[in-house]
Amino acid sequence: MTASRTALLDAVGALPQAVNPLALSLNECPFPPLPAVRSALYAANDAVNRYPEFLPQRLRSLIAGHDGIAEDQVIVGAGATGVIMQVLHAVTSPGDTIVMSAPTFDGYPIFAQMARLRSVTVPLDVHGHHDLEAMAEAAAQARVVAVCRPHNPTGTIEPADDIERFLSRVPEDTVVLLDEAYVEFLAAEQRIDGPSLVSRFGNVVVVRTFSKAYGLAGLRIGYGFCAPDLSRQLWRMQLPFGIGHTAEVAVAASYAAENQLCQRIRMIAAERRYLQMRLWAMSVYSTDGQANFVYLPGRSTPWPEVFDGTGLQLRHYPDGGVRITIGSRQSTRAVLGAVTAAR
Ligand SMILES: Cc1ncc(COP(=O)(O)O)c(C=O)c1O
């Protein structure tokens, strides 16, 4: 076999398994792509000899129409990751300060380092909530503050009123990243009206992604929206030809199949509640998670030992806590089996 043929087989063999009940470490969607999304992607493949749009105007317009925001308020990136980096590149200079909670989404310390920022971390409270008072105080000296709602890894959400109070204390020239990577898992009454928020707070960028509830993590599509003045500044950093053809068709197909997506989201949320309830019945404390994962703090149980040798891929934290992505009922049984065996 030629080396190139071997390399091809290796590359295909290295693709992650779409369905793997033990892969619970990255908060991915446990389902393979919807049939309509898959068909749209086939169609997009036929045009890969051509460049995509110079700047992703059509995708921007599609998202704006869906979310009820003006087109010029939207920026698009390679995942929420790309959007966050775009914001940092546009509004910070090396040496500026970014405030985040600890622990938080693993990406933030990495992004801060890439943008050569000084990170100031504020510990979460004992139930995994942000200390918004302390974060507002720290924001007075910072260029950027990141607040995730739901938070990663704890899945907790702060009440909308508390977020508003926090925003009114943050200086107007400090940019707030309101990271809503998991917003689709929230019930309608738990959500914040993002478009209204950014019309009242010109320094807020709401960040979202198609990687989680939409199940498109491998395509790398995220977006942000904010007040027009700020979005003009951010759009100037939009990478030419930076978003491939597949993004627009996959997003359009997903919006068209929203009923099926909502059904999947409801199944994941129901499975999360089932796991939380079963853990609670075994007197295992988990934070009040509202997304597609459950967080068990490391206070009383050595979780790495509990899950060692089970084959489950989970995200362990330095304090002994563990974050478990919701998968199928098979995944839930594997988690509960390990917890039961350790008791
Ligand atoms: C809170 C939060 N923000 C952003 C991201 C990045 O997501 P993306 O895949 O869109 O880059 C993640 C991924 O885990 C996340 O948990």
Image: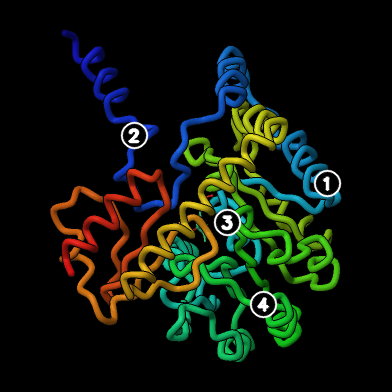
Mark closest to the chain's N terminus, 4 or 3: 4
> Mark 2 sits on what residue?
16
Mark closest to the chain's N terminus, 3 or 2: 2
In the displayed structure, 78 sits above or below 314; it is above
Q: Amino acid at mark 4?
A: Pro
SS category of the residue bearing label 2: loop
Q: Amino acid at mark 1?
A: Glu
Residue density around tag 2, few if under 14, some if 14–19, many if 20 or more, within 10 Å: few
> Mark 3 sits on what residue?
181
In the displayed structure, 173 sits above or below 187; it is below
Query: Residues at badges 1 and 2 in contact (C-beta under 8 Å)?
Result: no
Is ligand 1 closer than 8 angstroms to the Cβ of mark 3? yes
Q: CA distance from mark 4 to mark 3?
A: 17 Å
SS category of the residue bearing label 4: loop
Of circles 4 and 3, which is in front? 4
Question: Who is closer to the viewer here, 247 or 211?
Answer: 211
Residue density around tag 4, few if under 14, some if 14–19, many if 20 or more, within 10 Å: few
| Percent of width and height locating residue 285 | 37, 75
| Percent of width and height locating residue 171 | 72, 84
> Mark 1 sits on what residue?
71
Q: Quadrant of the C terminus?
A: bottom left
| Percent of width and height locating residue 136 | 63, 87
> Mark 4 sits on what residue?
159
In this rendering, would 105 be left or right of 341? right
